[in-house]
Each structure stands twice: as C-alpha cells, then as structure tokens.
Amino acid sequence: MLQPIIGFVFIAVLTVLLTGWFRNLSIENHWLDKPTHRGSHHQAVPHIGGVAMMVTLCLTIIVLTISGNMSGVDSIVWLAIVLMLGIVGFIDDIRNLSKRLRLVAQIIVAVIAIWYFGGINTLNIGPINLEFSGFSYVLGFIWVVGFINMYNFMDGINGIAGCQALIAGLILAVWLYHLQQQGESLLFLAVAATACGFLYWNFSPAKVFMGDSGSTMLGGMFAVISLQLHNESNLSIIFPVLLFAWFLADTSITFLKRMLRGEKVWEAHRQHFYQLLAPNPEDHTKVTGIISLISLIIALIITVVVLK
C-alpha cells in the first residue's frame, strides 16, 4: 500500500518540476496563449503544460512494462495513444495545425482503441439492456473522438480540466484495482498524480495552461480506458458517463444550442455553462471548486455501486 503512495508523490513532484521547466522553455520561445475575446484570461500565458504530463506518463508506462505490471502490447497501445495526442496537441499549441490534421490524429487513436479493446456493444441502465452489436464499433469510434474534443472544450478556466483529471484518475484507479487490472490501475493513479503536479502551476492566477497537448491526451486516455473497462470487465459504459457527467452535459447542451443557431460548432467560443459562471479570472477558482465538488460526490456514489 505504501508503494503506490510513494509513487504518487514522486510522479506529482516530477510533474511540478517538468512543468516549471517547460514553462520557462515556452516563455523563451514565445509559445504563449495570448488573450482573445473568446478566452478567459487577460494576459499571455505559457500553454504547453500538458507536455510535462505526457513525458511523465510515458515514463510511467515504460516503468510499468519493465516491472511486469503491464504487458508489452498494452504498453505499446497506451504509448501510441499518449504520444499521438500529446505530440499533435503540442504542435497545434505552438504552430496552429489545421482542424483536419488534428482530426486525423483523433481518428487514428479511435481506430487503435476499438481495434484493441472493442466498441460499445451494450448499454445497461437498471432493467434496460440495449444491444448494439451491429453498431458497436461505430459507437466506440464516436465515443472516443467525441470525448477527446469534449475534454478539450472543457479546458477553458483555470484548474477545471486538472481537477477533473485528478478526481477521475483516482476513481478509475480504484475501479481498475477492484476489477483486477493492476497495470492500468497504476497508470491512472499516475494520471491523477500528474494532474496534481500540474495544478500547482494552474490554479488562479495560472502560471501555465495545459494546452491541447494535455487536454486531448487526457480525453483520449479516459475515453479509451472506458472501452477497456466496458469490454474486459463488463462495466457498463454508463459508469464513465456518470463519472464525467458535468463535462458531458455542459458540452452536449452547448453543442446542440450552437448547432441549432447555425453557428460553427468547431470554433472557439465562451458559451459553455462553466464559462458563463466564470466570466473573469477571479471567478475561476470558485467555479472550478463547485464543479469539482459536484463531480467528486457523483464519483463517490457510483464507486460504491461499482465496488458492490
């Protein structure tokens, strides 16, 4: 029991140090997120904090493989997902890639995920049991690509994406341990630790942002582990949906509203509910705290169900 705690602290501290180093690198190279009318900050801020998280998680996967906690094939799949989304997100942060190239990376990740872990073949809600055998891969594909973009959209105020990653990482680590998936349990404990280390720099006033390198990578990891739990442990996809209830609800409602108004849904905006609640940087901590508390309460309730 002591070893995971020591590992968590070590990874969190390593992420703090790496994030500080990448922050300085970002300032030296003028890789800064400048204020716009769609943003929620008033000054230029380094925005490659997610790269530090990516490096730490890659090192974690390698250590888990060497120690025998994760199979070689599993580690290759997870490294591919982390590196694909992290590197493409980093390039987008500093060079503004086209939306098509970003989508191609997301499609590749989705294909890898459903090829290795499978799609969404059932939906169990109490007595309701829906079968999607003919469309399982399509649903799995939509889930992964949609989830990656959802997490990216929700990274709009200080601390919100990091706090969600901290909560979800810890909860998923518990679920995975209970379901006897030791390697992935340790991996998502590491996700929580990297989020904890990143938050040292990200709470208001934020000294560094996660950027697409972090938000798309985390979104991809959470989406893919949901498919793994669904197919290898028979865990209903409704549990990951509830774990990210606020993120999914806010994104879905905002997306539908903008689509019905004929707006370009792929463009950046400030119409998410959490953004309306926090129009100024001084509101970020309060709103992030409220949303995180709600997410934590929901997570603990569904964890009781999963453990039973």
Image: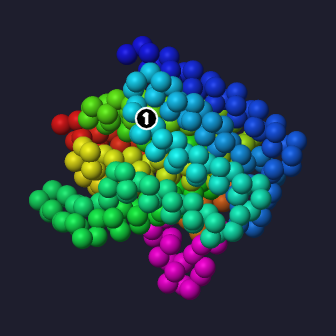
Q: Is residue 258 magenta?
A: yes
Residue 8's spot in the image, x, y percent?
51, 24
Residue that appears at 54% across and 21% down: 9
Q: Which stretch is magenta? A: 246-269
Point out the image quarter for the N terminus: top left
Q: Residue furthest top?
A: 2
Residue that label 1 marks: 72
State the image coordinates of residue 3 (x, y, percent, origin top left).
44, 15
Q: Which of the two residues, 56 or 293, is positioned nearer the viewer here?
A: 56
Viewport quadrant of the C terminus: top left
Q: Does residue 298 appear in this view?
A: no
| Coordinates of residue 187 in the picture (x, y in percent) | 45, 33
- What residue sits 37% from the left and 39% below the top? 172
Q: Residue at x 59, y 69 (%)?
A: 271
Examine the image and state in which quarter residue 154 appears.
bottom right
Of 187 and 166, nearer the camera is 187
